[in-house]
Image: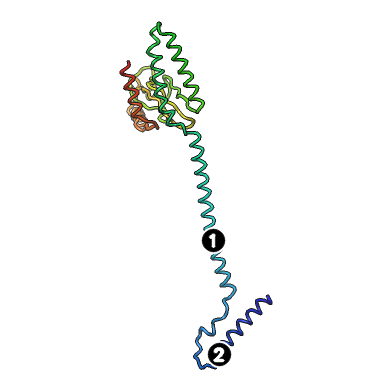
Amino acid sequence: MKTSSNGDQQDNKEVETKLKKKSKEGQNLSEDDYSSGPKSLEEEFEKIDKEYNELNEQYLRLAAEFENYKKRVTKEKADLIAYGNEELIKSLLGVLDNLERAVEHSESNKDSEPIIEGIKLVQKQFLVCLEKFGAKSIEVRKGDEFDPNLHQAVEREKSNEVKLGFILSEMLKGYTLKERLLRPALVSVSEGDGASSKKEQASIDSVLADTKPNGNTNNISDLLDSDTEKK
């Protein structure tokens, strides 16, 4: 407190000296000359407080941006580790499809049983290898409820056995990679026995129309065409 008082006294003396000097020299004294003393502590405090708040806001903003950046990088790194082989596995699914077709088309030929057993063994090893990397086939059975997140309807047929909107048969296996859909299972869906109400039919139509699962539909169409030609 004493230091501040001494400082104020010194500033006041400087102002008085300046006023006396101007007076001796015959200069006109302006209002600024009388008010050119030190700024009040309150003004200085307000200025410092404002600067502090601005810097603190900048710091908080940068800290939040950096935290978001770290989360994004961590997620990208985790996705790269988990799904880095996604495109490779997608390409191998076609090979697995052909192995399954080979088994299906050869089962009626007893003369080729040793070859069939060999193909089945390769198919089994193939599946085990894919499962090690997190890829699994989607289990589909007749009468299962249609799930637009896992299935893609490519045919609709009337049926007295299976309820409206439920699966009649599987046309091509679907696969997942951990939590991500690699390829939807292509299925045939029941239209019921024809006794369903218009409201029920419209509801099923809406579900099937909104089916947009992940996967390369062009490749799927090619596989179905290839399978049809073989049959």
Residue at the (53%, 85%) spot, across then down: 33
Q: Are marks 1 and 2 in contact (CB under 8 Å)?
A: no
Query: Which amino acid, mark 1?
Result: Leu
**Residue sticking out furthest to the top:** 111
Q: Secondary structure beneath disc 2?
A: helix
- Quarter-of-image position of residue 193: top left
Examine the rendered structure and indicate whether residue 38 appears above or below residue 17: above
Few, some or many C-alpha atoms within 10 Å of disc 1 (few <14, some 14-19, many ≥20)? few
Q: Can you tell which mark lies on residue 147?
A: none
Q: Is 37 left or right of 191, judged from the image as shown?
A: right
Label 2 neighbour load within 10 Å: few <14, some 14-19, many 20+ = few
Q: Position of residue 231 (x, y in %)?
A: 32, 15
Q: Earlier in the sequence, mark 1 or mark 2?
A: 2
Q: What residue did someone put label 2 on? A: 21
Quadrant of the image containing the N terminus: bottom right
Q: Nearer the viewer, mark 1 or mark 2?
A: 2
Relative placement, left or right, of 48 versus 105 is right
Residue 185 position, x and y percent, is 40, 25
Residue 112 against residue 34 in the figure, above or below: above
| SS under mark 1 | helix
In the rendered image, which residue does mark 1 sit on? 55
